[in-house]
Image (cartoon, helix red, strand yellow):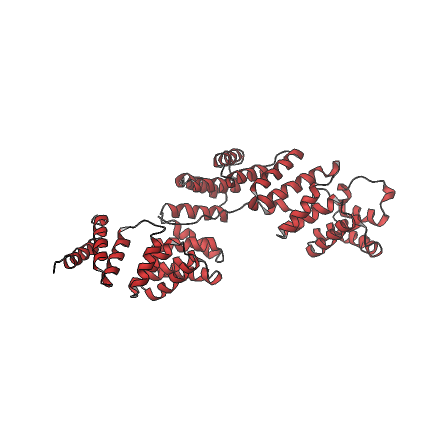
Amino acid sequence: MLRFSFFVLLFASLAAFGQSTAQKPGEQLPAAAPQSIPTQVAEAEAAIVKSDWKAAEARLNPWLAAHPSDARALFDAGYVADAENRLDDAVALYRRAVTANPQSFEAHVELGLLLARLNQFVAARAELAAATELDPGEAGIVAKARAWRALAQIDRTSNPAEASNDLLEALKLSPEMPADTLLAADLAGQAGQLDDAEQAYRRFLAKDAGSAPASAGLAHLLIARKQYPEAEALLRKALEQSPDDEALNAQLAAVLAAQDKAEALPLLQKLHAAHPGDKAVTHMLAEVLDDAGEAVEADKLYVALLAATPDDPALLVAHGQDLTRQLNYAAAFTVFDKATRLDPANADGWSGLAFAASRTNHPEITLHALTMRAKYLPEVPSSYFLWATTYDKLLQKPQAIVYYHHFLESSAGKFPNQEWQARQRLIILERKP
């Protein structure tokens, strides 16, 4: 059976941080008496409503040169820069707007959303949290709900419980949206509330059977429960409508691999060719290649992964196992030794080191590795045999006899060559002088 780690493929997170609220500055700011807005700023906002960014800049730039602390004009200029994809300028202008007026709800919200789009989540969270503490007025209720939803997206991985609270706050201000259902299901899954999460995904799919994110979310739960046939059926149906969806294809590959289906290999090869830098896909492909007996090809992938993370014990163990399959015991010994030094609790590392040490004539190290392995894994026929042959090599006859007998008692005819060797050695070792 393939051993694989399923990597949760988060969906829809970027969509939560789209550019700008639905209303433009001239529409979203609280109503003010016309005479309270400078003419240049009012004309700029009229241009913004028409998406005439150049005209807006032409009004705002000279005004801000003379009035550099005008919070409203700074916000408008930030909005224009944001719309024109001058993101560094937009961040700077929004920050100046917040400094000029710390109570500016709009500036905090737009700055927070922009920082989130730039993956500056710590700073984004601070701005969005500040916005939720302010009164947005009637015109800003929708924007405040959006701020809460953005906080939920930011918190979903690091603090799912807080993300649930964020989402509840958003729902107090505006009706539930499809993305809310998906997020709620995802959060329930992270909290271990798998039944609640499954029901939420199924409710959503009942309304939108073609939703790739919902299908991916439900498939993840089914995979976690090892309900592979059901997950496979769900994913195949979803891929009929979204054949190029990377998350769905990766999940299908994982499901096929878990069921030892040959179709997994070409699918993973296709995914890897399209995304050679995807570590999760590369790792999964290497595991499937190993299961298919392609140790040389699998090892090339592990070597590539280790180039990026040379001290990853799991990758080192996988690399060592492939070196062992290629009969390169000396190199395997070095790799397993490094892995066990990095992670002394890695039982597979100790197993590999014990075998590699036995093949490179390091019997004392073999015994040490077997002793360490026994702390984490029960003995099996192969480990009993290794104990016996190592003690035999060290001329420790009583211990060798004990372990040869343990091996024969546990092997049950599954290892005929080793069983013959064990019996022959016992004849010699137990011979009376």
| In the rendered image, the vertical position of residue 201 relative to residue 73, given as above or below | above
Q: Is residue 258 left or right of residue 189?
A: left
User: Residue at horizontal 84%, vertical 50%?
Assistant: 40
x, y percentage for residue 214? Answer: 52, 40
* Residue nearer the viewer, 311 or 82: 311
- Give the number of marks: 0
Residue 190 image offset from top left, x and y in percent:
51, 41
Res 303 → quadrant: bottom left
Residue 142 lies left or right of residue 258; in this view the side is: right
- The x and y percentages for residue 52 are 76, 50
Q: Residue at x 86, y 48 (%)?
A: 39
Task: Determine the image quadrant of residue 424.
Answer: bottom left
Residue found at the very far left of the displayed protein:
433
Report if residue 328 is visible in the image.
no
Q: Nearer the viewer, residue 59 or 126?
A: 126
Please state if 104 lies on the left or on the right of 119 as rendered. Answer: right
Q: Quadrant of residue 187?
A: top right
Q: x, y percentage for residue 134?
A: 73, 41
Quadrant position of the C terminus in the picture? bottom left
Q: Is residue 128 visible?
A: yes
Between 407 and 228, the one nearer to me in the picture = 407
Side (left or right) of 133 relative to 13: right
